[in-house]
Image (cartoon, rainbow, N blue to C red):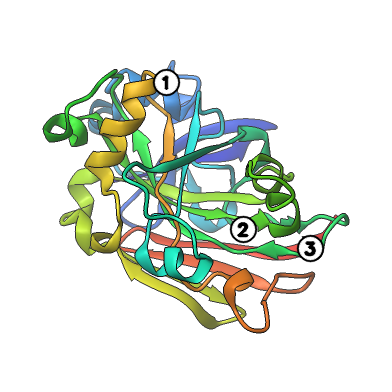
């Protein structure tokens, strides 16, 4: 199934995509305040069984919100493809490189990605996002996927100038409206072989990045095992698993995004996350 968050009646609701391309407004028909709460209650299947496949609104009639608008934690993985390590000259450690994003820096599918007026170095980073479905601490690797609700798409828009001012990534990774998240979460059972997920980033229609999930240095199970050693993972947490080679900053000459650009990240079989770029 494909579960999403969207704006309805002045607030954020949630629901799922029907077989004919509509959306069931679960937020309006249940006691759950948001998608995170429904995931925590392990209620996704029962909600579908109860509410059925009749849409309340057309998919092209909604305004998308970030798939999980209010995660307790957004953990991002850096340097997690060999090609990206090679182009940056960094990485290769025995443990994952982890940094954090804040929910306030996110935006949904088809919402503008904002190149800040402070810098002309806004870069793209197409990534697979893993959404936690069951809480756990010190999760064993062989049990890790039992804690996953589904997968989504992320564009970890990075203001490179600010990212590189110090050894810490945080400023360059948290400018407003630079973290694209969506359009929805696809449940694990719908995806099939996780290693065959294919990620492609296109800027103005030109392919900039392409890789499959089997090329991750630290795979999905390893990331859950590692992250859960230092903090308890809870439903709705997001682990953004890393970007392939091909980022704009590593190109000669560098390729950064600016007003009028269109950036999209496709992850097969999940879908495509798209943004127009503005300056603000």
At which x and y percent is residue 89?
50, 65
Comparing 48 with 157, the one in front is 157
Name the residue: 50% across, 23% down: 72
- Marked residue nearer the N-terminal end (3 or 1): 1
Name the residue: 65% across, 30% down: 11
Taking the image as shown, residue 86 lies to the left or right of residue 166, namely left
- Marked residue nearer the N-terminal end (1 or 2): 1
In this view, 203 is above or below 194:
below
Q: How many neighbours does mark 2 have within 10 angstroms: few (below 14), some (14-19), or many (20 or more)? A: some
Q: CA distance from mark 1 to mark 2?
A: 24 Å
Mark 2 vs mark 3, foreground winner is: 3
Tag 1 near tag 2, CB within 8 Å = no
Badge number at residue 110: 2
- Total residue callouts: 3
> Most extreme residue toward the left, as rendered?
142
What kind of element bears circle 1?
helix
- Can I make out residue 233 in this image? no
Residue wearing tag 1 = 37
Q: CA distance from mark 2 to mark 3?
A: 12 Å
Comparing 93 with 13, the one in front is 93
Q: How many neighbours does mark 3 have within 10 angstroms: few (below 14), some (14-19), or many (20 or more)? A: some
At which x and y percent is residue 7?
62, 39
Comparing 64 with 136, the one in front is 136
What kind of element bears circle 3?
strand
In this view, 186 is above or below 113:
above
Residue wearing tag 3 = 278
At which x and y percent is residue 14?
48, 34
């Amino acid at each position: 199934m494909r579960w999403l968050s969207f704006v309805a009646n002045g607030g954020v609701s949630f629901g799922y995509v029907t077989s004919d391309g509509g959306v069931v407004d679960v937020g309006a028909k249940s006691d759950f305040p948001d998608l995170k709460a429904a995931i925590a209650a392990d209620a996704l299947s029962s909600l579908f069984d109860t509410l059925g496949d009749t849409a309340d609104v057309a998919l092209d009639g909604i305004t998308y919100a970030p798939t999980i608008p209010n995660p307790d934690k957004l953990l991002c993985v850096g340097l997690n493809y060999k090609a990206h390590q090679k182009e940056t000259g960094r990485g290769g450690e025995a443990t994952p490189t982890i940094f954090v994003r804040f929910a306030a820096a996110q935006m949904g599918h088809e919402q503008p990605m904002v190149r800040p007026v402070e810098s002309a170095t806004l870069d793209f980073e197409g990534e697979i996002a893993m959404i936690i479905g069951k809480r756990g601490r010190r999760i064993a690797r062989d049990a890790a996927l039992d804690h996953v609700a589904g997968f989504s798409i992320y564009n970890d828009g990075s203001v490179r100038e600010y990212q590189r001012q110090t050894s810490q990534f945080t400023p360059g990774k948290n400018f407003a409206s630079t973290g694209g998240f969506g359009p929805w979460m696809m449940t694990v059972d719908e995806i099939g072989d996780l290693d065959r997920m294919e990620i492609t980033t296109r800027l103005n229609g030109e392919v900039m990045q392409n890789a499959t999930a089997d090329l991750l240095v630290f795979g999905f199970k390893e990331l859950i095992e590692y992250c859960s050693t230092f903090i308890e993972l809870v439903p709705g947490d997001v682990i953004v698993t890393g970007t392939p080679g091909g980022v704009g900053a590593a190109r000669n000459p560098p390729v950064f995004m600016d007003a009028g650009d269109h950036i999209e990240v496709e992850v097969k079989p999940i879908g495509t996350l798209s943004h127009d770029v503005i300056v603000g």
